[in-house]
Amino acid sequence: MGSHSSTQGHMKIFKIRTLKGNSKYGIGCRNLKELLEKGCKKFQLPLKSTRVCSYEDGTELSDEYLRNLPDNTELVLLTAEQTWNGFVTDIDRLLNAFYTRQTDVTEAALKLLTDEQAPQRRKILVDFIQNMSENISAENREDDKSWFEGLEPRYKNKSSYMRNSCESRIRSYMKEVQSSATASDPAVRDEYMKLIETMSSELRAVKYNGYYFDRTEEKTSRLCTAEGWFSCHGPFDMDDCSSKHSINPYSNRESRILFSTWNLDHRIEKKRTILPCLTQALLESNGRQINWKYFFNLLFTMENLKLVHIACHKKTCHNLKCDDSMIYIKRKPARKIKN
């Protein structure tokens, strides 16, 4: 777990509960240390061995993660012997066979609620039904005003905001590429800048790949379902997410804010690998033409990006390399002239 930093931040309010009890209490805190101290005091739990997790998906909190959570997010305190995978994961497994339409899922959950005797299962199902009752299908501002709280008036519908959110992430990657130009070898700086301009033009042409987050886009373009559900792709070194993390930022304001903690992670790392490789390729080009589209795809597209939940975002060195055979454009063999 991340360090319990005592750095003072803005006061935030969270709903705290334990795994066994039904009671929830609002607790104000500025950091994780303060949250744990107040929570343990309220529920009479041992501070040293208690940790705090997201009630929704079971993610263990760090100070960084806590700062990104919206107010009134529900959290659960766990003692040393307890584990929690989140009610969303639990219900997803339970109702997978019923998943056709939202109404079917809700009806299935209600049926299970009346059949199931375990208090904990009933509590989870109640939370699930409440979550499914959110105004997910609403798209326009006037149909779900609470979703747009805190956003600029220029956003008239959810998809336009989500598209812009994705564009902003891709733009930030381009800014990193541009800033690295000043650190590149002076001998190739001009060529480096020309490549950046070519990539910038391509990004503008594809509108910064904003369609990745837009649920109104074609199925082959977007990363979510038509309803707006996103699934975690898992860590860079795995084929999928073993925890089955999922989120629908279209459902409510809290999920919209929480989605900002999900990462578009580069499998082959941007700063450690791709940009140094590009600079080296320019230095060693010897008249060969750089395959800029290969580097473009590594930097800005899902050929090298993975959408990951914060718990699946490993910040260790990936140790993945660029493909040497793709760095330069292959010259076509000269045609033999027949006599």
Image (cartoon, rainbow, N blue to C red):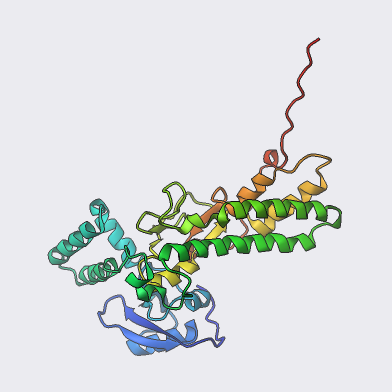
Where 7 sits versus 224, above or below?
below
Residue 127, by quadrant, is bottom left
Where 100 sits versus 314, above or below?
above
Where 330 sits versus 175, above or below?
above
Residue 287 falls left or right of residue 319: right
Residue at point 82%, 48% (across, down): 283
Closer to the camera in the image, 167 or 316: 167
Residue 59, by quadrant, is bottom left
Q: Can residue 315 be seen in this view?
A: yes
Residue 336 falls left or right of residue 303: right
Residue 107, by quadrant, is bottom left
x, y percent for residue 209: 54, 55
Furthest residue toward top? 339
Closer to the camera in the image, 54 or 306: 306
Residue at point 45%, 76% (across, down): 69
Furthest residue toward right? 187
Q: Can residue 236 be seen in this view?
A: no
Furthest residue toward left? 115
- In the picture, which quadrant includes the C terminus? top right
x, y percent for residue 333: 74, 25
Residue 302 falls left or right of residue 225: right
x, y percent for residue 239: 48, 49
